[in-house]
Amino acid sequence: MLPPRILLIDDHSLFRCGLRMVLSAAIPELEAAEAASLEEAMRMPLPHDPTLVLLDIQLHGLNGLEGIALVKRRWPQAAVIILSSEVAPQKIATAIERGAAAFVSKADPADRILAVIQQVRLGRTVTAQQQPAPQAPLLTPRQSEVLDLMCQGLSNKLIGRRLQLSENTVRGHVQAVLAALQVSSRSEASFAARQRGIVA
């Protein structure tokens, strides 16, 4: 099995953080690095070459599909898993043709993404399986507004200013959002919200 040295390339910092937390909880002795773009990833000093690269399609600059060859040239031993919010048969085919070991949807539940990573670490190629996205939780309009601002990285204080609410009221909405999403932190909430398509 490939050693758990993962490089996550995605331009949403909260999504990266949430996914990294999920991976860290599930994979013993994980070494994880993050980059917001392919250009940044190429410049990063890493203690060890990654054995697995999780690569988003929608990136600023060079996109994920165009970047597979670049990743494979830089780290020939690394397996590439493409992450995308859009699972189109043509994109899946293109990714696999260009050398990706797997293609997974960001709408997939975390255990599905982890299962794909484990399969790839075992040396198998995995393509996307059509699965219904997890059902969106029932949030009030105000909770949806708070979640959107949380995903933009705003603090409770700044959310309160934006929505003209007290900080205590915002704190209550944040706790309700975490409970509805069944997560325990703001970064996990952002990851879950993007995964389920609740926020863009």
Image (spheres, rainbow, N blue to C red):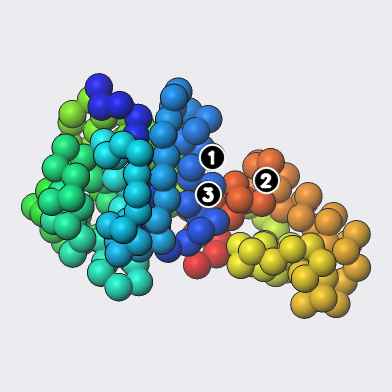
Element carrying mark 3:
helix
Element carrying mark 2:
loop
Do the residues under discs 1 and 2 have CB atoms within 8 angstroms?
A: yes
Q: CA distance from mark 2 to mark 3?
A: 11 Å
Q: Residue at x 41, y 61 (%)?
A: 36
* Amino acid at dot 1: Met
Q: Nearer the viewer, residue 173 or 40?
A: 40
In the rendered image, the vertical position of residue 105 relative to residue 141, given as above or below? above
* Amino acid at dot 2: Ser
Q: Residue at x 21, y 60 (%)?
A: 67
- The mark nearer the N terminus, 2 or 3, is 3
Is 70 on the left or on the right of 31, as rendered? Answer: left
* Amino acid at dot 3: Cys
Q: Nearer the viewer, residue 106 or 11?
A: 11
Q: CA distance from mark 1 to mark 3?
A: 6 Å
Do the residues under discs 1 and 3 have CB atoms within 8 angstroms?
A: yes
Is 17 on the left or on the right of 119, as rendered? Answer: right
Q: In this view of the protein, can residue 102 be seen by the observer?
A: no
Q: Residue at x 60, y 47 (%)?
A: 188
In the rendered image, the vertical position of residue 198 relative to residue 187, given as above or below? below
In the rendering, at what x and y percent does residue 57 appear?
30, 61
In the rendering, at what x and y percent does residue 156 appear?
79, 62
In the rendered image, the vertical position of residue 161 relative to residue 103, given as above or below? below
Q: CA distance from mark 1 to mark 2?
A: 10 Å
In the rendering, at what x and y percent does residue 179 appear?
72, 45
In the rendered image, the vertical position of residue 67 relative to residue 32, given as above or below? below
Q: Residue 185's mark?
A: 2
Residue tagged by mark 3? Answer: 17
Q: In this view of the protein, can residue 155 be seen by the observer?
A: yes
In the rendering, at what x and y percent does residue 191 appear?
54, 51
User: Circle 1: is it few (<14), some (14-19), or many (20+) Cα within 10 Å?
Assistant: some
Q: Residue 21's mark?
A: 1
